[in-house]
Image: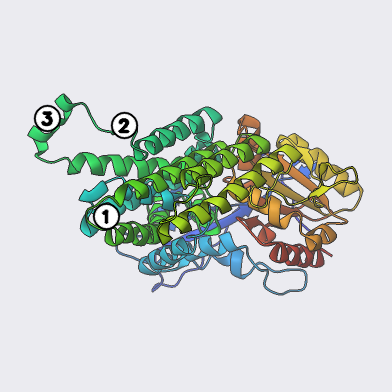
Amino acid sequence: LMEVYHEQVNISIPILSEASASELFVLAFEYQGCVEDRICYPPITKYLKVNLRTGLIDIGDQPPGLSSTDSRYDVAALTAQFDANETPGNSAQPISEQDQFTKLLLGQSLLLVIALFFVAGIALTFTPCVFPMIPILSSIIAGQGESITTRKAFSLSLVYVLAMAITYALIGSIVGYFGAEFNIQIWFQDPWILSVFAAVFVLLSLSMFGYYELQLPVAIQSRLAAISHSQQGGTMIGVGLMGVFSAIIVGPCITAPLVGALIFISQTQDWQLGGLALFALGLGMGVPLLIVGTSVGKLFPKAGGWMEPVKSVFGVILLGVAIYLLERFLPVPITMALIACLIIASAIYMGALEALPTAASGLRKLGKGLGIILLIYGTSYLLGAAAGSRDLIQPLKGIILNSGGGISSELPGRIVFRQIKGEQGLQVALGNSVRLDQSTMLDFYADWCISCKVMEKYAFTHPDVLRALDNVAVLQADVTDYDAIDTELMSALGIFGPPAILFFDPSGKEIRYRRVVGEMSGEQFAAHIIDTIRQIQ
C-alpha cells in the first residue's frame, strides 16, 4: 500500500543522534507526483543537509558538501535508496549502471571518484564520444608540416584534450544544475550549425590539398609577432578552440558515467564535485588522443617531399569528418552518394585508372592496387544509394538481383515503433498498455545521435531482440527537433539526452533500474529485455 497526499503535506521526522555523532548529515527523501486517476511520474529523490545545531539547510540554496576538509559524505541516509530498496521477494533491488556512478559520487573519497571516472573515460575510446576526434587531431598535427616535433605534437594534443575536458565539465555542470533544456551539445546539432562546421572542415581539407595556405594577413601576423615574438600562442588558441567545438559538436554522447554525474549534480546541486568527475572523465577520453597526436609527431620524418601525400591523406580524412557531420540530418541515399564521391575521387588520385609504366616502383604498384579496391568499394556505395539501401557500413546489404535482372532492396526485420510526442503522448500510450495488461519499452532517439543509429542498426534488427519484444509495446520519442515539448518530457523522466531506453510494467510504472543509457550489442540488449520481462512478471 502507498499513502497518497493531496495539496500540501507536512511530515515530522524524529532524528536520534549520539553525542559523539557528527552534527552534519544528509537526509534523502523520495516522492512521486501523479495525475489523478491517470498516470504517475517517475519517483524523484531530493537531498537536504541537516545541521543539528542550526536546523535544516536546503542544499540548493547553500554551498554543497558537509565540510571543506571532509573528503567523504555521510551517506547512511543518502544511499538508502540504493542499498535498502527491496523487491517483492525481499532481495536487494539492482540499480542501473548510471545510478551506480551516482552512488559512487555520493559515497567515495575524492581521489577514488577522480580515478574511476578517469578510467571510465578511457573505456569510451572507440565510442562516438572520442573516435571522431582522432582524425581531427591527427590532421591538426599533420597540418603543421615539416616544423612538427614530438614535443610540439604533445603540446598541441594536450591543449586539445584540456579544452575538450573543460568543455565537458562545464556543459555537464550546466545541464545537471539547470536541467536537460540547457544541454548545449544538443543545441548545436541544428542542421545549419552542422552545415557551417562541415564547411569549415571542407575548407581545412582544401588547405591540406595545397589549394591555399590558412594564415592571417601579413599585417596582423607582424603585429602579433611584435607582441608575442612567436606564433605558438596563436596556434595553441586555435587548437584549443577546435577542442571546444569538437566536444560540443563532433562528439555529442550520452554514457552511463556521464549520466550518473548529471543525476548527482541535479539532485544535490553539488556542481563542484560533479564537474570535477566530468573533467576526469574528459581527461580519460583524451588519453588515446594524446597517444595518437604525439605518435603522429614522433613518426613523421623531419623533412622531405613525404609531406604532400601525407597532407592529402589527412585532407581526405577531413572531408570524411564533414560528411560525418552532414550525415546526422541528410537522407541516407545522399550521404551514401557523398561517401561514394569521396572514395572514388581518392581512388582516381591514387592512380586506379592510370596505366603503370614498365619501370613502376613497388610502392606505386601498391598504390594502384589500393586505388582499384577503393574504386570498387566506392562504386558499391553508388549502387546502394540507387537501390535504396540504408546501411552506411554495408552498402550492398539487403540488395538482391530480382528475377528480371534488376536490383531491388530487401531490408532485414526491425522494430516497428509507435511514435509519441511529449508527456501527453506518453500518457495515452501507457494508458493503452495498462488496458491491454502489456509491458512497454520507450526509446529516445534523434537523427543526430550516432549511438542511436548504432542501436538501430545492430540491436533493433537482431532476431533475439525482435522475439523478446514480441508481446511488448514499443514506443519511440524522436527528440531530433528538441523543442519545448521534447525537453518537458525528458525533464519529467530525468533523461539528459538520447540514447536512452526505458521500460514500464503493465501498470504503467517505470522499472527505473532497468534503464539503458548508451549502446548495447544485439545479444546484450536481448538478454536485458528478457531479464526485464522476467522480473516484471
Q: Earlier in the sequence, mark 2 or mark 3?
A: 2
What x and y, as percent, mark residue 319?
A: 47, 40
Q: Is residue 399 visible?
A: yes
Distance from Cα at disc 2 to Cα at disc 3: 20 Å
Question: How far separated are the C-alphas under marks 1 and 2?
Answer: 23 Å
Quarter of image, res 79: bottom right
Amino acid carrying mark 1 in the image: Ala
Q: Is residue 239 above or below residue 261?
A: above
Question: What residue does disc 2 label?
Answer: 212
Look at label 2 and name its amino acid.
Tyr
Estimate how packed mark 3 is, as few (under 14), some (14 to 19) or many (20 or more) residues with alpha carbons within 10 Å. few
Residue 295 vertical position relative to residue 173 in the rendered view, above or below: below
Residue 153 numbered tag: 1
Q: Which mark is drawn over residue 222?
A: 3
Mark toward the start of the polypeptide (1 vs 3): 1
Dividing the picture into quadrants, the one containing residue 149 is bottom left
